[in-house]
Amino acid sequence: MFEIENNNLNSKLGLHYFPDTFHYRQEDISKWIPELRAMKVGWLVIKSSAERAIPESFIKALIDENITPVVEFNLALNGKTKVKELQVIFEAYARWGIKYIILFDRPNQKTQWQAVNWMQNDLVDRFLDQFIPLARQAIESGLVSVFPALEPGGSYWDTAFLRACFNHLQRRKQDLIINNMVLSAYAHSNGKSLNWGSGGPEQWPETRPYITPEGSQDQCGFRIFDWYQAIAQAVFQKEFPIILLQAASVQSPENTVLTEEQTKQNRLTQCQLIDILKEPQLNLSDSNGEVESIDTNVLSCNFWLLADSLADDTSGFAWFQNGEAVSPCVNRLKEEKKTFEEPVVSKSQIQYTPSTHHPIRHYVLLPLFESGVSDWHLAVVQPYIKKHQATLGFSLNEARLAANVTVVANPKTIPEECLNELRQAGCKVERIYGDGTSIATKLAER
């Protein structure tokens, strides 16, 4: 089963690494690890071939920096990849600390298939015939086989393809895959508001595959995860964690050269998403109104692209070119690094009174131990966070900014004097503690 990730303080922000498999040398580690550290990147999407594993030294360097790697194989959809050929690489990756792998890419897109195979019937079944054996082996090796991202819209409409895949997995009784399911999605902005399609099909019921009526919205935007989760809820009666790829890109970078104006727009939209990731408790707006907060099931938003050579078509998307930062996103993260760290201010720097404005509606305060954040605490509060759309954190200073604070900790880990400080700051405070069952019960009753 999926466990909530405990990684960087900037836990949702990620990047795609180079779009090839040639930058895993020691000199690449020396160059890029300090940059990733300075930006507090929590995830990195890296590419692997099926014939040769990424060097252990590179993977270990990421994990030592508390960066979660996501390994993309992008296997050909020709049915020729055998389980035994990948088993050794799977087991090595699991042993080195890799958790997430993505086997295929955009199986709903005609260009990913040989023409003769695309034209045959039962495309979904033929895709699953390739996906299931490899996914099962990955899971048995200790990995999470992330369901591959689909082309938004696509030759075979992505929401229809995804629903069919879910139904077929259920019909085939693939409980091992379903119970370990993590989704992925291409969350391009397509030049639209980051709110485009927010709320999914429930909010836009007139939208159908291949048909988006005037005045309606669809899944072809950053909020694609709302639509995929609605399908998961309809088929499985639950939602899944999801990894967002190429987040907020103005369009798919495949075979794309951005104009100067598109490059500016791409960087502007990425900076806007960075602000949302950094300050989820604040109400940020764009030209189309207030931007919705990002669902707690979103594990990471991975931006395209850390770096590439100027000769490649993707260079218009790169944050670094010729080793130098060219995107304002880089400095935005480095210069405002303090917003990710504890504490932002000391007690002596700020005085709180009952009349202090509370920009956060509801804050759930968890203890932060020397060993880091407790996965157990995160798991037990997740349904409560989702139900009440509360802000989750570990900072007493942040909690003071909330009108309501729920403290999930016993008096030894967060003393009563801390709660009194919150009350003095005008917060309404409630403490919940006990064993796992009793805490879950108490939270469910609220």
Image (tube, rainbow, N blue to C red):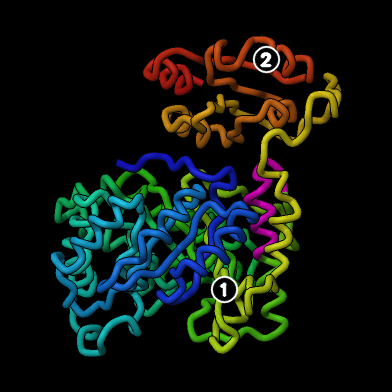
Residue 201: percent from the left, percent from the top?
A: 47, 57
Rendered position, 378 above or below 415: below
* Horizontal side of residue 159 vs 192, given as left or right: left
> What is the quadrant of the N terminus in the image?
top left
Residue 432 magenta-highlighted: no
- Could you tell me which residue is drawn at 60 percent across and 33 percent down? 393
Magenta-highlighted stretch: main secondary structure?
helix
Residue 8: percent from the left, percent from the top?
A: 54, 45
Tell me the number on the disc at residue 419: 2
- Amino acid type of the residue tagged 1 in the rendering: Ala
Rendered position, 372 above or below 432: below
Q: Earlier in the sequence, mark 1 or mark 2?
A: 1
* Horizontal side of residue 71 vs 288, given as left or right: left
Q: Nearer the viewer, mark 1 or mark 2?
A: 1
- Crowding around mark 2 (Cα neighbors within 10 Å: few <14, some 14 to 19, many 20+) is many
Residue 153: percent from the left, percent from the top?
A: 44, 73
Residue stretch rendered in magenta on the structure: 270-283
State the separation of the CA atoms marked 1 and 2: 46 Å
The quadrant in which residue 231 appears is: bottom left
- Element class at badge 2: helix
| Residue to which mark 1 is pinned | 307
- Amino acid type of the residue tagged 2 in the rendering: Leu
Q: Is residue 279 visible?
A: yes
Q: Is residue 167 visible?
A: no
* Horizontal side of residue 65 vs 379, given as left or right: right
> How many marks overall?
2
Near-viewer residue (57 or 232): 57
- Could you tell me which residue is drawn at 30 percent across and 67 percent down? 53
Rendered position, 212 above or below 43: below
The quadrant in which residue 134 appears is: bottom left
